[in-house]
Amino acid sequence: MKALFVVTGRGIGGDAVIAINIAKALSKYDFQSEFALDHTAPGLLFKKKGIEWHKTSIPQAGGHAATKKTLVNAGFKTGKAVIETAKMFRKINPDIVVGVIGGGAVVGCLTAKLTNIPSIGILNTPTDAKVCTKITTTVALPESNLFQTELQNKNINKAYSPVDPEIIVGNRENALKNMPDAFDENLPTILLSSGSTIFEKMAVAASKLGKSGIKANIILVGEPLEEEYNKYFDNKIDNNKLIYLGYINWINDLYKIVDIAVVTDDGMMIHEAMTWGIPVIALLKVKYGRYHNLAAVFEGAVLESELENLEDVLGDAFANMDKMKDNAVKYGEEVLKSSDKIARIICTRAKKK
């Protein structure tokens, strides 16, 4: 059978990872997967994996940061996008369409409804929840407002973000080999990341910790959203001890030497940290002021922090390290099952064709 994933975003970060991880799980159920991205998406993650993709129009309203204006603009564009995407569906003839997050979920599921193809919506924004739950079977991820809500609708499923189970396979020695001389193996290691892209608040947090004198390795990964953020990574000024690695493709290895992760209150990295049993500090409102309350989803394994009190919260995390690790391990066991759980939901829906 053939699954077609309609994926929002640039094909670089979390939305693309979600689609690829689900597709990998689906392959165990004899599904072949193809992908569609917006015309403007560079698709760097797909390129790295040697995956080709189809192009169509996938309007975005800004996800959790959507405003009335962006929603209206995206709404006007969605009609044209559905017509264009319908032509693509008829050419590809998939057995099921998987709409992934935001615009990808909306366009994918609406077009599937129009072309009489079974679909699944993978949700994590208020907009995709409003649209997709009315027309098809859906899976709400933890960032969705539906995830922490008691639901009676049997067509709305819940799942942790689908990580690749192979994420837990890493090489400590390879990580150490890639570390600069400033890395001290005898110190605890704090990883900071806002995903593949570094947002300014995370850059400021990393620089602040690098200058704090804290007895730990301070590591930052990702590519700056704006070139001007590079000023925060200059180790030649203000005695900044930050270790900036840039965008890396060996994150699995890096997790082997991380003791605490400071990440955003969303996305895959919190889930990945759980699979490694790594305590997490969720730095709040990094991405356009968004807040998801994932500390409640992973209670006891994730602490919340504002930028101003990050050092204090880090102190609390180190003081409760063993308990937080134990809680992370428990969640991690369930997170590792999420890709297969979603794949089985898709299989069931496809068989109803």
Image (cartoon, grey):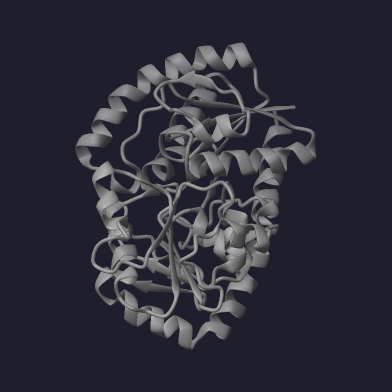
Res 8 quadrant in image: top left
* Residue 330, above or below 336: below
Give the camera-side residue of 338 and 322: 322
Camera-nearest residue between 44 and 250? 250
Q: Residue at x 54, y 80 (%)?
A: 324
Return the residue found at the far left. 69
Looking at the picture, how far across and down is residue 82, in whole percent? Answer: 43, 20
The image quadrant where one finds the N terminus is top right
Left or right of 276, for residue 182:
left
User: Quick check: 47 left or right of 222?
Assistant: right
Front residue of 48/94: it is 48
Residue 140 in the image, given as x and y percentages of width and height: 51, 51
Q: Exactly how many numbered labels are in the figure? A: 0
234 and 339: which is toward the camera? 234
Q: Is residue 133 visible from the viewing direction of this image? A: no
Which image quarter is the C terminus in?
A: top right
- Whether residue 31 is situated above or below residue 56 in the rendered picture: below
Measuring from the top left, give residue 120's x and y in whole percent: 58, 37
Residue 209 placement (x, y as % from top left): 33, 71
Residue 293 visible (yes or no):
yes
